[in-house]
Image (spheres, rainbow, N blue to C red):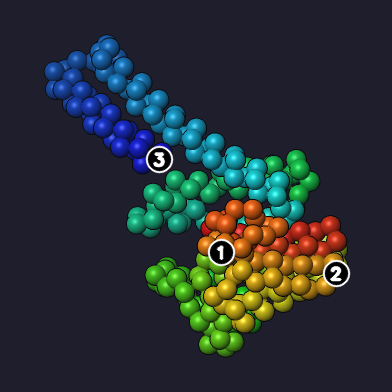
Amino acid sequence: DYKKLEKKLHKEQLKLGKKRARLLKEGRKLCDCRNYQKQRIKVARIYEKIRRKRHDFLHKLSRQLVNNHDVLAFEDLCVKGMLKNHYLAKGISDAAWGTFITFCKYKAEWAGKTLVQISRWYPSTQTCSVCGAKTGPKGAKDLGVREWVCPECGAVHVRDENAAWNILLEGVRMLAETEDARWGEVLERVRAAYSSVVLNEPNRWDAGVSLDGEAGVYIQDGDSSLGSAVADEPTAPRKMVLQSSNVECTFTAD
């Protein structure tokens, strides 16, 4: 929908620019030209439609995350600094990361869920989520490295999945320091289950891991034809759930 609206917006903006240039060349006032004002309103309506579509998507996604998860961990990204990369600036702006975090914050507060933000300086990409060694790709210069192997433990990592797991583990660790001891137990179980799957079956996400009577983990591949309690559709995203007492931590990767 964004691409269709962007093409339409570009077309209408060209018309508006031509009308403006012609009127200025003729020395006429823009406020007195009805056709120009009609075109200006048409462009403004397209902008408004794009904004509403973006907010609708962000509201639905944030509501889904808050309803399905008790713990949400995010990285406090410096969006203003990221926009200086002109190759990625448009995609970053369309994602509206700051607005999305705001929506998640107040929805989590209303629902009584836990939301934690880790520092932007935490090396989530560089750190191996299995052994903790900082052997991964560094910064923007290694942005093209999407998969890497840790030389310390031999774990095979996908860049985004490894970073997401590090953010989750760091968020639970921060909760363990500031709240009660149950978070420490959850942290150890999540780390142990994930490490076991990454080291033993790096290419198989349709593996079930049973920790004990109180905690369980199930990982399903998005392309797997196996059914599960986690997702009914065979094309569901990869999802890992750990339950301990009344705490549920979930990692999902599209």
Residue at x 56% of width, y 77% of height: 202
* Label 3 SS: helix
Marks 1/2: CA distance?
26 Å
- For the residue carrying disc 2, how many other residues have a C-alpha within 10 Å: few (<14), some (14-19), or many (20+)? few
Q: Please, what secondary structure does the residue beneath circle 1 have? A: loop
In the picture of the structure, the residue carrying the numbered disc 2 is 213
* Residue tagged 1: 224
In this rendering, the answer to whether 154 lies above or below 31 is below
Amino acid of disc 3: Tyr
On the image, the x and y values in percent for residue 154 come to: 56, 86
Question: Which amino acid does the dot numbered 1 rest on?
Answer: Ser
Of 138 and 94, nearer the camera is 94
Residue 132 visible in this rendered orientation of the protein? no
Instruction: List the single residue furthest toward the left.
Output: 26
Distance between the Cα atoms at labels 3 and 1? 30 Å
Q: Position of residue 18 (x, y in %)?
A: 19, 27
Q: Quadrant of residue 46?
A: top left
Tell us which disc is closer to us: 3 or 2.
2
Does the residue at mark 3 contact the one at mark 2 (Cβ under 8 Å)? Answer: no
Q: Is 17 on the left-hand or right-hand side of 142? A: left
Q: Residue 2 has which mark?
A: 3
3 or 2: tag closer to the N-terminus: 3
**Residue 252 sits above or below residue 109 on the image:** below
List x then y, in percent, for residue 58. Answer: 56, 42
Could you tell me which secondary element the residue under label 2 belongs to?
Answer: loop
Quadrant in which residue 40 is drawn: top left
